[in-house]
Amino acid sequence: MAVKPSIPKGTRDFYATTIAQRNYLKQVLQRNFETFGFEPIETPTFERLETLMGKYGEEGDRLIFRILNSGEKVKKADLNALEKNDLRAFSDSLSEKALRYDLTVPFARFVAQYQNEIVFPFRRYQIQPVWRADRPQHGRFQEFVQCDADIIGDRSLLQEIEMIQLYDAVFADLKLPAVVVRLNHRKILAGLAEAIGAPERLIEFTIVLDKLDKIGVEGVEKELIDRGFDPKVIERLKPMLELTGTPEQKLDKLDTILGGFEAARTGIDELKYIFQTLQKQGLSAVTLDIDLTLARGLNYYTGMIVEVLPPPEVKMGSIGGGGRYDDLTSAFGLKDKSGIGISFGFDRIFLVLEALNLFPKEILKNTEVLFINTDVAALDWSLQALQQLRKQGIAAEMYPVETKFKKQLNYANQKQIPYVIIFGEEEQKQNVFVLKEMTSGTQTRHSLETDIRPLLNR
Amino acid sequence: MAVKPSIPKGTRDFYATTIAQRNYLKQVLQRNFETFGFEPIETPTFERLETLMGKYGEEGDRLIFRILNSGEKVKKADLNALEKNDLRAFSDSLSEKALRYDLTVPFARFVAQYQNEIVFPFRRYQIQPVWRADRPQHGRFQEFVQCDADIIGDRSLLQEIEMIQLYDAVFADLKLPAVVVRLNHRKILAGLAEAIGAPERLIEFTIVLDKLDKIGVEGVEKELIDRGFDPKVIERLKPMLELTGTPEQKLDKLDTILGGFEAARTGIDELKYIFQTLQKQGLSAVTLDIDLTLARGLNYYTGMIVEVLPPPEVKMGSIGGGGRYDDLTSAFGLKDKSGIGISFGFDRIFLVLEALNLFPKEILKNTEVLFINTDVAALDWSLQALQQLRKQGIAAEMYPVETKFKKQLNYANQKQIPYVIIFGEEEQKQNVFVLKEMTSGTQTRHSLETDIRPLLNR
């Protein structure tokens, strides 16, 4: 019985136009990574299970797609575990490999594995699909592309500056205006944690802080008090709730409030340096902002934290992010390699470009010329001319069978082929061919020796 | 405890040089597919299990990588099947998805699924990795790239001609000389099966025939008789054992021997037509041959069968192949779609290009200029100049920290960066920078306003 053709939920088929657009985005990213001195790497689709497990927290582990062991190996199924409802152990007994869940862990594995061959500081980029067993929903897929750039093996703040310049270069190249890069610093957050007197409640504090736009200063104050934060502390930190103005002004205010805490002091100084240097150098597509509520990867990042927001007219979450880390590779036995990494949200940037109509028209590849199949006598010249065009890099086809003109012209229309060449009985008598422009319907006659390429309006 | 970093057997990490070379090969293929009017498609990494199972024979089914069901679903494990040692059923109860095993079945699924939107004849190409649970060994990987081009929805022999011209165009573009395209025809084989009087032993017959090079005509005769083929038949078919000469001569001989069998007659006529047309049109990189022992995909192909061999100086099996089929999509409910498909053996063609040193040098991307990090005073000008170069598309970096010159130059050497720019204390006093060419050691001095790009020998 025939299988009803369909694909698993959360996956996608891609067609010509989308592929051309995705390749365009990929090429812009690659080009900029390479002018910044980044080298590409590619890692296997599946890694050893132990390489991935335990790196993404319990929830992450559950979302990893495992490969079922092949052949006889499934006999090793741990039925005791199944009986005890220890599904993790049962699954572990059935699989040794798993699909790449992100690019960070394979990169860490790569750096540790080839540490003796790599020249540090190592600048690498990687654009590859990853897989997550997330419940599929609108705009969330089980297979999607990630795109990361990292510099590992150096602590210089120049790297932070370079990474923001890289964001700027890519978005300028994509002609994507008004992208906002929001900065925060792990050490400022550490100072803030000290300041509120409840370091363990830092995240909770920043979550409330994040509601500022919606509920205003008083709302935030009230909620913090309701949640049991010390009113005296809130009073002291109040200027932080009104953190407005330019990034410099914000950093100056933070200085006043948190400058007394040593960690915060370092964080503020670093952001000031980064900010001033970038301002001096100039940014094209990107504007900077300071955002204390930015707390991504708090357990992971140790310095600057960055998040990228799309132009305000597109309603969407962040289209990129990253930060400075100190301990990426120690799970693989390589200690003390500080680095900085940023990611580009490939699928989301794609949607932004689509929404703002920013894909260049000329990237769409399409057949430009269709040779009408008239009769056997036309074949020799037609095939020669066809081959000639292709050698000149022009996409061309010949309709495969001699059939009604209407059907052949219909094929050209459906495939949006702009030119059709007719070499029928009449034309053969006069040693000419007819070039028909499909949009206007204009037909012109040319001698058989004519170089066709210049006739095409390209 | 730290995990020892490694990857599963049969998989590969790729670095910058290899990636650049693979991208080059991919781009040559894409460019030629597109000038021939083929559109790209991409299908998901995993398909529904039922889409793939039963399409590749029993052995193939065993080599399909299955995805283990996530979470609670593993509770549905069919323990009875396990007890009965029915590992196939046990595995079926644990997985619903599997990794793409080739590009043909996903393509068939795609055509059936989108049959109402596709304009036929549909020319598609696809370059994507596939996965097979083969025992890894030298040169055989569990993850490798396949590259297919198909035209589906038409029976015209023009397609056969186009496909061979496509091989020719790709290998000419790759500057790969002396590629041999061997042709056979399913219907000639059918005629041969009739002629030997034992249709069910056709494969066995062609296998013996294939030993001609090694054991000679007499050896083949003897083995056929030993195997119980009718000596009278062998006598009659003997001229076929001595099938030498040009493809035309071979086809003429075949005509004499097998022309009486109707199926063979059609096959011979088709190959003659294909051959004559191609000869008239001219081939650049490829020579044609007729090879009766070519019996790939015998159950699958219905017309011309093709196999591509690398230049004789490279010892390697076929680097491509394909043929005409009639029944690709009926497993997915779409009947009567004849088509023709060819594949390019991506990894093998890569090895051939490597062995013959045919990768162009200029495809290797590398940082061209390293700015030495001298002191804070140098930073402003250096970062500006760096940014300027990058905007001109030149890959450039700045060493991230102020450290010994020797260490920085060493970095440039290790990364084979051809130029280094020094803007130290001395240079700052005189408002110049020094450009050092690393290979020759030559140093030149230039004013700070100099456009650096023309100084680089690119």
Image: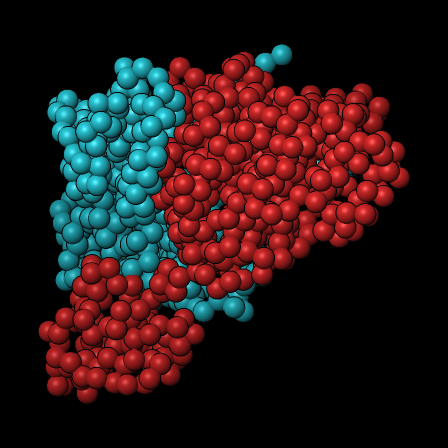
Chain colours: A cyan, B red
How many badges with numbers are in the image?
Answer: 0
For residue B448, side relative to residue A125 (left or right): left
Image quadrant where residue A380 sits: top left
| Residue projecting furthest to the top | A1
Residue B115 picture location, percent across and down:
43, 17
Residue B191 picture location, percent across and down:
67, 26
In the image, residue B339 sits, relative to residue B305, either above or below, namely above
Residue drawn where x is 80% and y is 36% of the image: B235
Q: Between residues B18 and B156, which one lies in front from this camera angle?
A: B156
| Residue projecting furthest to the bottom | B426
Q: Is residue B372 visible?
A: no
For residue B231, side relative to residue B348 (left or right): right
Residue B398 picture location, percent across and down:
29, 69
Q: Between residues A354 and A321, which one lies in front from this camera angle?
A: A354
Residue B323 picture location, percent across and down:
55, 32
For residue A137, side relative to residue B4 (left or right): left
The quarter of the image holding the C terminus of chain A is top left
Q: Between residues A216 and B109, which one lies in front from this camera angle?
A: B109
The quarter of the image holding the N terminus of chain A is top right
| Residue projecting furthest to the front | B256
In the image, residue B326 sits, relative to residue B44, either above or below, namely above
In the image, residue B212 sits, relative to residue A155, either above or below, namely above
Residue drawn where x is 81% and y is 47% of the image: B218
Image quadrant where residue B119 sits: top left
For residue A31, side relative to residue A286 (left or right): right
Residue drawn where x is 24% and y is 79% of the image: B435
Residue drawn where x is 74% and y is 47% of the image: B212
Q: Between residues B321 and A422, which one lies in front from this camera angle?
A: A422
Q: Is residue B214 visible?
A: yes
